[in-house]
Image: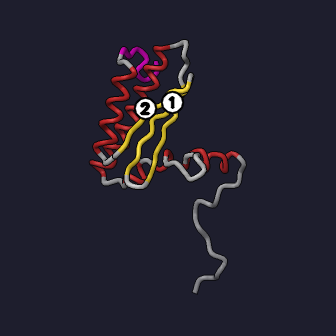
Amino acid sequence: MSYAERTKVPIERSIAEATKLVERVGAQSVGVVRDWDTYVFAFKIGARSYRYDIVVDPDDPAESRRRWRVLVLQVKTRVTLIEEAGEPIEAAFMPFQVLPDGRTVHDHIGAQLAEGRAPPMIPYSTESPA
């Protein structure tokens, strides 16, 4: 059984919930745009912009509602980390930060990983230790 598989929560309520959550951690502007099969949930905190792309099936409203509930859960988890565990906002939402070219950090790094050209996980030095 998938998370929120039987949810009846309307998408509009999930959008309102996600909006309130990001506003709790300082979002000054929040917007939602829909383009046929994709919703974009975007917000700005300080000078940084963040974006979640929620792909839906226009012919399956139940699955669309479920995907929005998943987004709310994800945002709620990140906000809880910020408020309760002291996680920096930038770290909590980093995968969804929008880069100058319009891609998210996740899209940028994910493409590098897929091509096998990601930087090493542990920085190294070519200098010998003293």
Looking at the image, is 54 positioned above or below residue 104?
Answer: above
Viewer-nearest of discs 2 and 1 = 1
7 part of magenta stretch = yes
Q: Main secondary structure of the magenta part?
A: loop
Front position in the image: 106 or 102: 102
- The residue drawn where x is 35% and y is 53% is 87
- Are dots 2 and 1 in contact, CB under 8 Å? yes
Answer left or right for 20 relative to 93: left
Front position in the image: 115 or 19: 19
Could you tell me how many numbered marks the image carries? 2
Question: Which portion, as a residue range, is magenta?
Answer: 1-8
The x, y position of residue 45, in whole percent, is 38, 50
Looking at the image, is 35 positioned above or below residue 92?
Answer: above
- The residue drawn where x is 30% and y is 36% is 20
Label 1 packing within 10 angstroms: few (<14), some (14-19), many (20+) = some
Front position in the image: 4 or 95: 95
Answer left or right for 26 relative to 118: left
Label 2 packing within 10 angstroms: few (<14), some (14-19), many (20+) = some
**What secondary structure is marked by label 2?**
helix
The quarter in which the C terminus is drawn is: bottom right
Which amino acid type is marked by label 2?
Leu
- The residue drawn where x is 48% and y is 31% is 33
- The residue drawn where x is 61% and y is 70% is 124
The x, y position of residue 53, in whole percent, is 52, 34
The x, y position of residue 19, in whole percent, is 34, 35
Residue tagged 1: 54
Which amino acid type is marked by label 1?
Ile
Q: Residue 71: which numbered mark, if any?
A: 2
Q: Quadrant of residue 18?
A: top left
Q: Which is nearer the N-term, disc 2 or disc 1?
A: 1
Q: CA distance from mark 2 to mark 1?
A: 8 Å
